[in-house]
Image (spheres, helix red, strand yellow):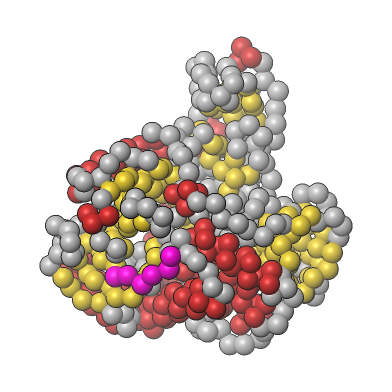
Amino acid sequence: MRESSPIWSRTHRHHPPLSRLHSSLSEDVVVIGAGICGLSVALSLLERGRRVMILEKAGIGAGQTLRTSAHLANALDDRFFDLERWHGEDGARHAAASHGRAIERIERWVERYRIDCDFRRVEGYLLREGARHEEDFDHELEAAARASLDVDRVTHVPGLLLGPALRFARQARFDPSAYLAGLAHAVVDLGGVLVEGEATAIEGGASPRVHTATRQTVAARVVVAATNVPFHECIAIHTKQAAYRTYVVGCPIPRTAFPDILLWDMADPYHYVRRVDDADSEASWLLVGGGDHKTGQDDAGTGYGELVEWTRARFPFVGPVEWTWSGQVVEPVDGLAFIGRDPGGMENVYVATGDSGNGLTHGTVAAEVIPALIAGEADPYEGLYDPRRKPLRAMAGWISENANVARQYADWLAPGDAHPLARTEGTVVRQGIHRVAVSRDENGVLHAFSAVCPHLGCAVRWNAAERTWDCPCHGSRFDPVAGRVLNGPASRGLDPLEIAENDS
């Protein structure tokens, strides 16, 4: 089953154009990235009276924001009893409150800027299905209540033969493409500048600078890296979080077959479900996501098939799969994003990363935290999201993730795969001591690159489901034809190589 595109692409969304970066510029605040995080931070700063330029390399929403099922929840993907263990009861309560305030901010902006994005408050249900022990289900109810969430236990999900479950009030959903378009127009209306350019490096200091792929420089008073993962830090953040691929399938359903709710379970990997309606017809689809695995590891080709099997076993009313897409989820070892001052100590540089499956609300939390820190105000969540924090209470997870990364470097000792390549196939071959990433495109043309990931030197692997080169260490992903970066933290693409046709 091949990837198509997110369901949000079914309708055209008009975005304001990006202007060209013709020469070196100076600006008050430069925000890198025009996804939900970058646009939200920019809009919040503009509302505070700051001058803001957004630097975006590929287009509004071209990154990970639209590769979502668009749940808006303060009932977070990580269990609240785990958040208590990692951050204490106050930390878990702050986490719930911050994501609740993020949903309120989205709701407020939808109304203030008249964004037609089908925003609606709905209930969310956490199924016990997949729980390791029944006690976990009870512990989660108790921990969520201590975090001041409106939660109770129900025997079944209304309208579905599924249960028991925990019911969370006042969750929400929307169309993220329409919302991004509305944010971008609001940014422009308030004087923000949207500029096309690929940032490749950041210099901190009293007057920080952003360097671009075209060797231009943008000077600023403040720089905010809102790029899903920071491209300017090699180690400070990346040892504390890991990249996972997640998959979504969309199947047509009768609109009355599934209620307008959010649904997710306690399995590992877990599943998440919601209904999407077409405003201009009676068409509806069931979106089912999950199948998560570490980027560049495990068999990426099984993700969609397992989701379809899981879906049909529980929702036999679904039609044939019409939509398939995947996304990059960045998991911090202690469950919460890294939002705040640059962890490497760069002066006047701020970062936001580690969405942990709640990127839409984590990105909106950044719109509260980062502007407050830039203004010299107190951190609204007392350092809960500080990128410099030490995950001491999650040390077992930290050790496990970094041991996993270390094992991936063994690829350099493995033999190459010398089988003949068909069209749209890729493999890694050896040329002496070097490993070469080789693939054929749809026209049969051979493309070859060094298999060395430019981030920290891990060897990339072929992702057959998505036809990309993926790094199994820190999640960088690359286009197989041009070698360009699709996902950071790599700040540049794979190095092209020459290879003889008979080598593949």
- Per the image, is 121 magenta? yes
Residue 287 in the image, given as x and y percentages of width and height = 34, 51
Q: Is 146 in front, or is 307?
A: 307
Based on the displayed image, in which of its 4 quarters is residue 166 positioned? bottom left
- Compared with 46, 425 (above or below) is above
Decide: is 387 above or below 498.
Answer: below
Name of the residue lying farthest toward the top:
502
Which is the main secondary structure of the residues drawn in magenta? strand
- Residue 45 shows up from this direction: yes
- The residue depicted at 36 percent of the width and 46 percent of the height is 250
Is residue 354 visible in this depiction of the protein? Answer: no
Residue 34, given in percent of the width and then of the height, sits at: 63, 60
Quadrant position of the C terminus in the picture: top right
Tell me if residue 71 comes above or below residue 314 in the rendering: below
Q: Residue at x 68, y 72 (%)?
A: 189
Tally of numbered discs = 0
In the picture provided, is 271 more to the left or to the right than 375? left
Most distant residue in the right direction: 23
**Residue 247: percent from left, percent from top:** 40, 47
Q: Quadrant of residue 86?
A: bottom left
**Residue 497 rendering spot, x and y as whole percentages:** 70, 27
Quarter of the picture containing the N terminus is top left
| Along the line of sight, the residue nearer the viewer: 28 or 340 | 28
Point 77% across, 74% down: residue: 28
Would you say 479 lies left or right of 140 here?
Answer: right
**Image point (61%, 77%), residue name:** 44
**Magenta region includes residue 351:** no
Nearer-the-camera pick, 15 or 445: 15
Q: Is residue 437 left or right of residue 81?
A: right
Query: Magenta segment, which residues?
Result: 118-123
